[in-house]
Amino acid sequence: MPQSQLAELVSSRLRDIPDFPKPGVSFKDFTPLLADHVAFSAVVDDAVARFSGRVDAVVGIEARGFMMGAATAYAMGVGFVPIRKAGKLPSRVHAASYALEYGQATIEIHADAFVPGTRVLIMDDVLATGGTAAAACDLVERLGGTVVGVDVVVEIAALGGRAALNGRELASVLVL
């Protein structure tokens, strides 16, 4: 599917939720996209076409990154690694804290999630300020992995998240 057509499809399947998770924040909800087989498949196929053969594992950021990342990893025939909110993983972890556009958060990855040298694609739903994605890159690199790219469904350009990735490859289906 041409990129412009895919961006239109994604845009048509998003909805804004005002004042969520707190007043003043307009949350980009992409659960309608997940419910639409054509749209969901097209987004996964786009990531697969871009990164297949270049990565050994896909890392998905909790929670919506799990959905995109697991489907993409399956389609590429590579492993999937979750990055979760603090306190959710049962084994030894590495943690990274960062600022959100509406607060602070900490994410974690299992210390033995993959071997050093693993080429990794990081996936999430939205890139806003870039704090979450940058923290995920930091965690992957602390484990000795190489971040091949960060793939998101929506990039909110006005929030400047791309700059937080320090020149890493960023793929976004829709830029708002």
Image (cartoon, rainbow, N blue to C red):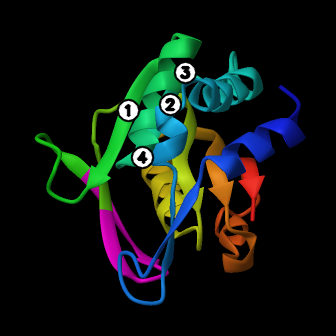
* CB within 8 Å, label 2 to label 3: no
Which residues lie in the magenta part? 94-106
Type of amino acid at the residue the image marks with label 2? Val
Q: Residue furthest left?
A: 90
Of the image marks 1 and 3, the number of the one nearer the N terminus? 3
Other residues around mark 3 within 10 Å, as few (<14) / some (14–19) / many (≥20):
many
**Relative to 160, is 141 on the left or the right?**
left
Name the residue: 72% across, 28% down: 46
Q: Is residue 116 visible?
A: no
Q: What element carries label 1?
A: strand
Establish if 67 lies above or below 88.
Answer: above
Where residue 48 appears, x then y in whole percent? Answer: 67, 22
Can you tell which mark lies on residue 64? 4
Residue that mark 2 sits on: 58
Query: Mark 4 and 2 residues: CB-CB less than 8 Å, in contact?
Result: no
Task: Give the alpha-carbon distance from disc 1 to disc 3, as whole Å.
Answer: 11 Å
Position of residue 10 measured from the top left corner of the image (x, y, whole percent): 68, 44
Depth check, mark 2 against mark 3: the one in front is 2
Which residue position is annotated with label 1?
81
Label 4 – label 1 distance at C-alpha:
13 Å
